Image (spheres, rainbow, N blue to C red):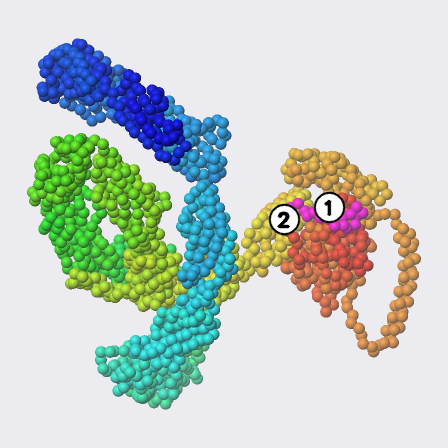
């Protein structure tokens, strides 16, 4: 090839060659002008192009080209073998493929004849040239030739085909196989044979697959193998393959094992866990038991190595645990399960969440387009790996605490407008994000914004108007809600006008915002006014309140009744007649008339009879009965209204008729002689006419034949009866007389010559014949006073029996002087009584008899029925019955068995009444269940007790609530009128099933066996009984039912449904046309039958033509009705054809379906459509118009489009329609949710397949729509008598279909309560609704969307209301809720009782009083009160209830605990229920005697002493003032039983040491506590002496003296059952003192002890003994030691001679002094004598002297403010006193014995008690001591018994105390090394002592004071001196010479020294 190019300069010319665009570099010559190709090959064919370029020039290049075609002669690539043998019926391929250029053409010949001319269809030349012969026959044997030729030459080859036939042979039989359940398995069975063997597979005798049989899942493959797909477990077994042909048969077997598939049955689930928590992913597997599974987990494709990461753990069951999750764990996890039984894998995504961050940069600005709104913006924060759910907006209003304002801001939002704010307030905002982990941090606060003021947007609240007078109305209100004031309220405007009249408003302006009431005055009497109130602020006047209507009060009538006439009918009755005054002068509602009668001069005592108004008769008649006989009366008549009485008519004077008189008064006898007496009387009190005289008669007692009668004039009031027989009893009778006859007799008996006297009381009273309401009293009459008994009187105590209870006169029996028994009637059943009697004669009444025994009357059935029985509708099947329970006194029996019985029956039926028993006597309501709907019932109640039933209450009637019909209409029929309509007829619902007033009917229908929703046609009115259903599907079988509906809703549909088919019609178009096979000259199309066949399809017609020609050239073909595919041939390639398919029914050919097709083999799937768009104007609430542009159809026309949508944010894609017309480019997407965001996408489908989905559309939000769901009314309860409280639950947000703006309440009064016949009422007009039968709805609009309750007020009393509720948004109102009914007029009290006061009556009773709740809060008549009471701070355990069924204002709570604080709360109740309780009020019962002490214990028991302790009472019932301890021997000691009583003041100490006991004696101890009285005793016995196991006595001690110290030695004795733990040394004065512990706690190892004699009293001889102690107690004491004196070496001033000298000198001075005094006394002979007293020769205790206690365990004793002097019985004997001073008592103790004067009580503040000695068998004489002599101005003092004098320890018990020194605490105990007192401390071991009450005081001590026997280390406590008293102020201690030691010991309280 040459390429010649020319250019200048030639040197820059360059030529380049390219082949098919590829640069050629070889074969070039002559400056590239020539291209030479040597030996061209096929590969060198192509376009060659040369390009000439002028280098370094802008001249464009030029090019030229040419094609090179290289031809190649044919060459065989594949040739057949020279000889081919094949079996019959097989397929043989004879290969013949050649190559060459151009491609060679292959021609076949058989036996030199072209195959194409043989026209044998079994011969087929395959692409590539191979000849395929199908179904070989013997005739196919022959020579086959293959010729390959092209333009370059021709080539041929040949083969010989021989067809043979052989018997079957299974060349490859089935092998034993194992397969997994659900997988496919092939059992091979390859055979040879000719003809081709027929294969049959069997399992046992069952043929699975063959040429004619093929069971499901078993497929016979072409190769003869058996395909089992899918395999089942049941497929296991032995399979047989049988091969048969005409030559024979062959068989092979194999076993198949089926394993259960290993599959993941519990796959891992997508999880979202919170950071730091644990994630668990399950991978539960089911597998065959014979296989082993292995788990492998991967994350994002990488294997997880659980061993290397401690946070990750894999359980044997495949469960993966990841602990402490964090963001690095986020990803997709896959569980792979591998096993020979199959592999499986499942994946799940793990998301780790955390709290979102705070929104950033929040900014708040005032809205420019909306009032009361603020725009808030912010930046979206990090969401914490979890989509934000919402934002929470909080607001601070006027610096108030933060509060949530919006809790559900959309998470996509970054701005929000906060509307509905309150003007004149400042706001600050903050916002936080919320995801499903929780709530994140709040953002920083916005700057504070303030809103301007506006007029109030709400009216004043609670506007109430009440008529105050007949010319004034009081208006009260409360300010508007603070959120609606919109500024500072400056005042109020009240406007009012006459209601219903065309008159203008009058205004009142109140400029004080604190005033919230106004009295409108100068109004018209009894007139209705409309009143409204509005508030105003600086911005203007606000909204007026709703109109309140109120009447001025009624006035009183201004004229009297007319034509009044009065006349006496008899002696006690006056008849009145009158006419009514004119209504215009009544000034209110005529309440009736009052008939008045009064005696002249007694106008304040008027008899009044009220007569109801009679509006039928013009003349009214009335009577006043019960007037006094023969009495002059003034009479009058008046009319009255509610406010009061009108003027009286003119008074008319008349007199009642005359009658017989009453008995004469005061019959008496005087001047009683043997033969005469004087009878006196007084005029009758009730003359009842003009007295005409008196009748007197007398007779001997019981001898009527001796009667003498005289008639006396009316002025005679006495008469002397003569001619009597001496000493004879006479009966004398006197009676007054009028013109009407003789009056009542007065009689008495008298004995002549014997004057009468006052009678005596009856005696020997007995009770018999006890009945429920009466008893019989037998008695013996008392002294009759010498005259007859005129009357017997019976008095009784009722209910509460006691000495101080009141006696009530119960019964009198007159004129029965001989009675010996009487019956007492009118008693109350089951009540306690105690009787007494009196007898009366003419002199007077006797004293009362002795009371009888207490009796209880028998039970009786109740006398009365429950009161105030009311019946209300509760539901459709129940009624609510209420009554007032019987008061307790009407039970007439045991309260435990009192209850009620309810009887109810349906009115108008003859059925048996049903009853129900209620066992609770306090029950006051009952719900009668299981009643018929909309039926009237009659109900009554009776009370029952253990005896029987009381009377029935009056019957009350009530109707159950209207309901829906409980069955459908009857006689339903349906008739198809056209192909799209059906006529339905029906009859009425049976009357028992209507359950209300039927308002209409609904026909319910749907296609049979279809899932489509039910459709309704409504027929309004209950007279319509047919309906034509139209727009139905053609030739469709419908199920049809009919239901009736009432006001409540739809009833039950009729059953069974009626089936009816519409008539047939021409069919609709076939659907689903597709062209699965398209060739250049033929197509195959398939279709589905019409969606609306409209009949039975008889045929299909197919018409097709070129799209470019008219329909006249179309090809038409008719197919049978079962055809669903068609192949059209003979088409032209690469052209467009139109196919039309139509169906035929008996009505004709229907609508055609049309489709295009291109005859080409180059078809492809379509391209996606363009991005779908939605224009804003095409967006509606529930549908949008979607637009798109089609994409390329891929040379295969689009058959249909599929539209999908998804709901944002998280919903999945959902198919809306998969059959959108292929010609459409828009589609209406319906069935969407309002106010919801959506995205859409579209895909197209042609014959090849689906396109990809288009891009997702932009998110669009549907518009708001009216709500489609009603709120649910939870309850409607009466709140006041004119209001109800409605509570509801709003619909869910998804059903609000927008932003909820508020609620609408519809309510109306139901009138059907007054109807009695409902079923006859019909709605004649088909369009009539329930509104024709009742009043229209009133509507109350609520603008607060957050409300869930509302008080609906201003309703009418005693009416039933229907209430419905709906919600609304900006679009409109939603459906109304189901109606709720409520009865208005009864409501529970809304206020508690007031002024609850508690008065403590006794220790077990509190009197509680209260005032009723405010009238406006009572909401009806108060029926009673409930009193709740409980112990303070123990409400849960002790709360009790007392119910009063009377509106009383007080109650007595009895059987309470003494001295206990109670909390009491009172609540009122009325017929509607219980009101609120008052705040708890505190009260305390009075003190009572305490309970017994909780315990009594003994300790430190020796042979002569014991320590007694006791516990506090469990129930103190007051302030414990002290205890009384009494002890005595159980058997006499030395013939004497001595009872000792000790009083302990105060509540502590509660123990005492008793020391004067005898060894081996059992003592009884009793202790009881005291408040103001003593409680019960607790007692215990104790036996003195060592217990069992205690140590024996140590050896007899001996004593050695070393100077001023003594040492006691002893030997150890028997240790008893336990080792010795310590020793105790006791001492006593040798002159018969009591043993007392000197040294305690001596170590057990010691057998001697040394102590100083300083702790003993000087000059006193002592005995000592030793006691061992072990764990069993104190042992037996040793024998006493020899006596030893505690005398030290005396100083000279104690020598005898010094004392004699001093005595002589003293005697001289005394004689001189006596002489001087005598001289002086004589010189003052006439001087005034000074007072002298009987001073004792012995020393007396001065003022303030006191007694202290030895052991500080007891309070010290003090005898204060008393000067005690004694007579000379306190004289010296041998240098010591022969009698000790008076026995002291501790400050908290008091002892006494039989010799102690009770006047000694003044010495100490203690109770008097006794100490007595009881002589046993021998009486012990008591020596009488002379008594004390005391100054007359001083209190008398005690004497003491002799046996106390013998105890020398008394002498140390008195110490002086300075006057005026107060007591100090008793528990400051001291002890020092030197024996001096020091602060010490420990109380005794039993029991632990509580703190000392402040009234117990100690005693100051003087110098030298100490304890008895005070060794070093002794723990014996001693009272301590008050530190503030100087020692110099202490007086010296009184020390008798016989004391143990000088001033060192005070006796122990309550111990042996005193007892």
Q: Residue at x 29, y 28 (%)?
A: 65
Give me the C-alpha separation between circle 2 and circle 1: 20 Å
| Residue at the extreme top of the image, as rendered | 83
Q: Position of residue 1294 (x, y in %)?
A: 33, 51
| Residue designated by label 2 | 1509
Q: Position of residue 632 (x, y in %)?
A: 33, 87
The segment highlighted magenta reads 1871-1888
Disc 1 crowd, CA 10 A, few/some/many (<14, 14-19, 20+): many
| Residue designated by label 1 | 1915
What is the quadrant of residue 1001 in the picture?
bottom left
* Most foreground residue, 1819 or 111: 111
Disc tally is 2
* Most foreground residue, 20 or 495: 20
Q: Residue at x 30, y 47 (%)?
A: 1173
Magenta stretch, main secondary structure, is: loop
1027 is higher (above) or lower (below) than 1154? below
């Amino acid at each position: 090839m040459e390429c010649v190019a020319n250019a200048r300069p030639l040197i820059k010319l360059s030529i380049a060659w390219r082949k098919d665009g590829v640069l050629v570099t070889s074969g070039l010559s002559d400056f590239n002008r020539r291209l030479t190709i040597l030996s061209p090959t096929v590969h060198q064919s192509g376009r060659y192009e040369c390009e000439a370029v002028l280098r370094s020039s802008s001249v464009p290049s030029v090019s030229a080209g040419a094609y090179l075609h290289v031809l190649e002669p044919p060459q065989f690539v594949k040739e057949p073998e020279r000889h081919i043998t094949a079996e019959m019926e097989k397929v043989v391929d004879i290969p013949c493929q050649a190559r060459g250029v151009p491609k060679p053409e292959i021609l076949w010949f058989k036996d030199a004849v072209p195959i194409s001319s043989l026209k044998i269809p079994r011969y087929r030349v395959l692409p590539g040239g191979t000849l395929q012969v199908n179904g070989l026959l013997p005739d196919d044997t022959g020579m086959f030739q293959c010729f390959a030729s092209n333009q370059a030459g021709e080539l041929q080859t040949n083969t010989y085909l021989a067809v043979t036939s052989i018997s079957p042979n299974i060349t490859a039989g089935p092998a034993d196989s194992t397969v997994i359940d659900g997988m496919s398995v092939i059992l091979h069975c390859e055979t040879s044979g000719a003809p081709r063997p027929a294969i049959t597979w069997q399992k046992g005798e069952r043929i699975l697959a063959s040429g004619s049989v093929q069971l499901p899942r078993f497929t016979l493959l072409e190769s003869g193998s058996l395909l089992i797909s899918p395999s089942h477990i049941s497929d296991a077994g032995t399979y047989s393959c049988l091969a048969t042909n005409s030559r024979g048969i062959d068989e092979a077997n194999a076993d198949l094992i089926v394993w259960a598939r290993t599959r993941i049955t519990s796959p891992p689930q997508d999880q979202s866990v919170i950071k730091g928590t644990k994630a668990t992913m399950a991978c539960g597997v089911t597998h065959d038991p014979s296989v082993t599974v292995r788990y492998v987990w991967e994350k994002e494709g990488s294997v997880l190595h659980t061993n290397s990461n401690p946070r990750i753990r894999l359980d044997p069951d495949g469960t993966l645990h990841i602990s402490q999750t964090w963001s690095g764990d986020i990803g997709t996890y896959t569980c792979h399960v591998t096993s020979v039984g199959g592999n499986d894998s499942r994946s799940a995504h793990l998301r780790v969440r955390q709290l979102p961050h705070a929104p950033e940069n929040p900014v708040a600005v005032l809205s420019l387009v909306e009032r009361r709104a603020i725009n808030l913006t912010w930046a979206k924060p990090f969401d914490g790996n979890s989509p934000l759910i919402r934002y929470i907006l909080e607001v601070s209003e006027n610096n108030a605490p933060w509060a949530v304002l919006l809790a559900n801001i959309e998470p996509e939002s970054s701005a929000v407008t906060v509307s509905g704010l309150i003007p004149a307030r400042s706001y600050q905002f903050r916002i936080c994000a919320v995801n499903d982990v929780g709530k994140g941090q709040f953002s920083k606060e916005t700057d504070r914004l303030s809103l301007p003021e506006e007029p109030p947007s709400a009216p004043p609240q609670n506007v109430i108007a009440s008529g105050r007078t007949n010319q004034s109305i009081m208006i009260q209100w409360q300010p508007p809600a603070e959120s609606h004031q919109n500024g500072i309220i400056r005042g109020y405007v009240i406007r009012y006008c006459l209601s219903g009249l065309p008159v203008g408003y009058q205004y009142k302006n109140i400029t004080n915002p604190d005033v919230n009431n106004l009295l409108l005055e100068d109004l018209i009497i009894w007139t209705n006014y409309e009143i409204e109130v509005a508030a105003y602020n600086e911005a203007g006047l606000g909204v007026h309140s709703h109109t309140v209507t109120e009447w001025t009060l009624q006035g009183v009538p201004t004229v009297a009744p007319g034509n009044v006439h009065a006349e006496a009918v008899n002696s006690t009755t006056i008849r009145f007649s009158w006419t009514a005054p004119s209504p215009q002068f009544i000034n209110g509602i005529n309440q009736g008339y009052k008939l008045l009668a009064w005696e002249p001069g007694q106008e304040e005592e008027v008899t009044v009879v009220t007569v109801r108004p009679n509006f039928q008769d013009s003349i009214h008649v009335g009577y006043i009965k019960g007037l006094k006989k023969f009495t002059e009366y003034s009479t009058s008549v008046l009319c009255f209204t509610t406010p009061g009485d009108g003027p009286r008519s003119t008074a008319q004077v008349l007199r009642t008729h005359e009658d017989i008189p009453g008995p004469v008064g005061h019959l008496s006898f005087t001047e009683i002689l043997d033969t005469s007496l004087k009878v006196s009387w007084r005029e009758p009190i009730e003359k009842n006419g003009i007295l005409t005289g008196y009748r007197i008669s007398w007779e001997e007692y019981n001898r009527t034949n001796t009667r003498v009668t005289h008639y006396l004039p009316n002025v005679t009031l006495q008469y002397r009866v003569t001619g009597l027989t001496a000493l004879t009893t006479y009966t004398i009778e006197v009676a007054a007389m009028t013109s009407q006859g003789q009056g009542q007799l007065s009689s008495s008996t008298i004995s002549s010559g014997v004057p009468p006297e006052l009678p005596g009381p009856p005696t020997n009273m007995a009770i018999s014949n006890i009945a429920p309401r009466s008893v019989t009293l037998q008695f013996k009459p008392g002294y009759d006073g010498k005259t007859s008994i005129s009357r017997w009187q019976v008095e009784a105590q009722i209910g509460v029996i006691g000495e101080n209870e009141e006696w009530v006169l119960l019964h009198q029996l007159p004129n029965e002087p001989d009675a010996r028994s009487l019956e007492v009637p009118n008693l109350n059943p089951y009540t306690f009584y105690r009787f007494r009697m009196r007898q009366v004669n003419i002199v007077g009444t006797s004293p009362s008899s002795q009371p009888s025994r207490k009796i209880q009357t028998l039970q009786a059935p109740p006398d009365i029925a429950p009161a105030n029985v009311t019946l209300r509708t509760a539901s459709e099947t129940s009624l609510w019955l209420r009554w007032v329970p019987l008061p307790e006194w009407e039970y007439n029996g045991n309260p435990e068995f009192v209850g009620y019985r309810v009887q109810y029956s349906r009115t108008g039926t003859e059925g048996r009444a049903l009853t129900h028993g209620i066992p609770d006597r306090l029950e006051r309501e009952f719900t009668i269940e299981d009643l018929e709907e909309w039926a009237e019932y009659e109900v009554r109640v009776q009370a029952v007790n253990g005896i029987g039933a009381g009377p029935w209450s009056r019957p009350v009637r009530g109707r159950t609530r209207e309901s829906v019909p409980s069955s459908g209409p009857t006689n339903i029929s349906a008739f198809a009128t056209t192909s799209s309509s059906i006529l339905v007829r029906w009859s009425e619902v049976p009357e028992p099933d209507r359950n209300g007033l039927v308002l209409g009917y609904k026909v319910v229908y749907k296609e049979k066996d279809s899932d489509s929703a039910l459709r309704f046609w409504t027929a309004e009115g209950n007279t319509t009984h047919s309906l034509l259903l139209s727009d139905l599907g053609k030739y469709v079988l419908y199920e049809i039912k009919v239901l009736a509906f009432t006001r409540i809703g739809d009833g039950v549909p009729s059953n069974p449904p009626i089936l009816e088919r519409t008539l047939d019609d021409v069919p609709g178009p076939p659907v689903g046309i597709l062209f699965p096979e398209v060739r250049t000259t033929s197509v195959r199309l398939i279709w589905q039958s019409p969606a609306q066949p409209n009949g039975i399809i008889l045929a299909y017609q197919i018409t097709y033509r070129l799209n470019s020609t008219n329909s006249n050239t179309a090809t038409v073909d008719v197919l049978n009705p079962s055809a669903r595919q068609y192949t059209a041939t003979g088409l032209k390639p690469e052209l467009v054809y139109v196919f039309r398919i139509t169906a035929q029914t008996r009505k004709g050919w229907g609508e055609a379906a049309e489709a295009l097709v291109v005859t080409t083999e180059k078809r492809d799937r379509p391209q996606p459509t363009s991005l779908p768009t939605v224009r804003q104007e095409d967006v509606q609430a529930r549908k949008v118009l979607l637009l798109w542009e089609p994409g390329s159809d891929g040379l295969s026309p689009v058959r249909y489009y599929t539209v999908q949508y998804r709901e944002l944010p998280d919903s999945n894609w959902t198919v809306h329609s998969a059959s959108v017309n292929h010609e459409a480019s828009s589609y209406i997407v319906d069935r969407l949710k309002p106010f919801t965001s959506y995205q859409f996408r579209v895909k197209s489908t042609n014959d090849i397949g689906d396109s990809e989905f288009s891009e997702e559309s932009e998110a669009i939000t549907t518009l708001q729509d009216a709500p489609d769901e009603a709120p649910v009314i939870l309850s409607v309860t009466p709140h006041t008598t004119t209001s109800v409280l409605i509570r509801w639950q709003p619909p869910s947000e998804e059903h609000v279909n927008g932003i909820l703006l508020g609620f609408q309440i519809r309510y109306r009064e139901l009138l059907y309560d007054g109807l009695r016949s409902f079923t006859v009422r019909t709605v004649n007009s088909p369009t009539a609704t329930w509104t024709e039968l009742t009043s229209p709805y009133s509507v109350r609009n609520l603008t607060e969307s957050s409300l869930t309750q509302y008080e609906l007020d201003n309703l009418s009393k005693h009416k039933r209301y229907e209430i419905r509720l709906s919600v609304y948004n900006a679009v409109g109102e939603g459906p109304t809720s189901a109606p709720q009914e409520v009865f208005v007029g009864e409501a529970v009290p809304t206020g508690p009782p007031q002024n609850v006061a508690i008065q403590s009556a006794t220790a077990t009773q509190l009197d509680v009083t209260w005032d009723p709740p405010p009238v406006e809060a009572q909401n009806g008549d108060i029926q009673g009160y409930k009193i709740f009471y409980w112990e303070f701070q123990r409400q849960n355990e002790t709360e009790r209830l007392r119910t009063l069924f009377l509106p009383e204002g007080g109650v007595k709570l009895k059987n309470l605990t003494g001295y206990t604080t109670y909390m009491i709360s009172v609540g009122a109740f009325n017929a509607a229920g219980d009101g609120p309780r008052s705040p708890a009020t505190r009260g305390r019962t009075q003190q009572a005697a305490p309970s017994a002490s909780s315990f009594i214990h003994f300790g430190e028991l020796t042979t002569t002493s014991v320590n007694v302790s006791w516990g506090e009472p469990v129930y103190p019932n007051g302030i414990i003032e002290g205890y009384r301890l009494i002890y005595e021997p159980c058997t006499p000691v030395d013939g004497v039983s001595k009872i000792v009583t000790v009083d302990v003041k105060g509540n502590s100490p509660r123990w005492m040491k008793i020391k004067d006991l005898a060894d081996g004696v059992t003592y009884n101890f009793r202790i009881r506590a005291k408040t103001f009285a003593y409680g019960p005793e607790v007692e215990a016995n104790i036996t003195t002496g060592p217990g069992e196991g205690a140590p024996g006595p140590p050896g007899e001690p001996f004593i050695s003296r070393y100077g001023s110290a003594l040492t006691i030695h002893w030997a150890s004795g028997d240790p008893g059952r336990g080792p010795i733990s310590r020793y105790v040394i006791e001492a006593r004065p040798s002159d018969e003192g009591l043993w007392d512990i000197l040294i305690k706690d001596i170590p057990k190892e010691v057998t001697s002890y040394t102590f100083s004699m300083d702790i003993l009293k000087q000059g006193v001889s002592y005995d000592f003994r030793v006691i061992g102690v072990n764990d069993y107690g104190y042992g037996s004491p040793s024998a006493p030691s020899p006596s030893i004196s505690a005398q030290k070496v005396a100083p000279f001033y104690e020598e005898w001679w010094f004392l004699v000298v001093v005595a002589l000198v003293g005697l001289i001075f005394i004689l001189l002094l006596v002489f001087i005094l005598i001289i002086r006394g004589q010189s003052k002979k006439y001087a005034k004598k000074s007072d002298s007293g009987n001073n004792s020769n012995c020393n007396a205790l001065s003022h303030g002297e006191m007694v202290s206690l030895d052991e500080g365990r007891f309070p010290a004793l003090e005898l204060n403010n008393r000067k005690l002097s004694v007579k000379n019985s306190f004289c010296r004997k041998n240098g010591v006193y022969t009698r000790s001073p008076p026995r002291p008592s501790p400050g908290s103790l008091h002892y006494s014995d039989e010799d102690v004067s009770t006047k000694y009580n003044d010495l100490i503040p203690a109770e008097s008690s006794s100490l007595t000695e009881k002589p046993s068998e021998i009486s012990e004489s008591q020596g009488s001591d002379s008594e004390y002599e005391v100054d007359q101005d001083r209190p008398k003092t005690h004497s003491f018994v002799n046996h106390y004098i013998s105890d020398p320890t008394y002498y140390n018990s008195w110490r002086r105390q300075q006057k005026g020194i107060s007591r100090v605490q008793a528990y400051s105990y001291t002890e020092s090394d030197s024996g001096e007192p020091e602060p010490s401390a420990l109380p005794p071991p039993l029991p632990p002592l509580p703190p000392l009450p402040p009234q117990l005081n100690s005693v100051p001590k003087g110098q030298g004071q100490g304890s008895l026997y005070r060794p070093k280390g002794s723990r014996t406590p001693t009272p301590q001196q008050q530190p503030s008293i100087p020692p110099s102020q202490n007086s010296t201690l009184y020390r008798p010479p016989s004391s143990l030691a000088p001033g060192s010991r005070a006796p122990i309280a309550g111990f042996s020294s005193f007892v």
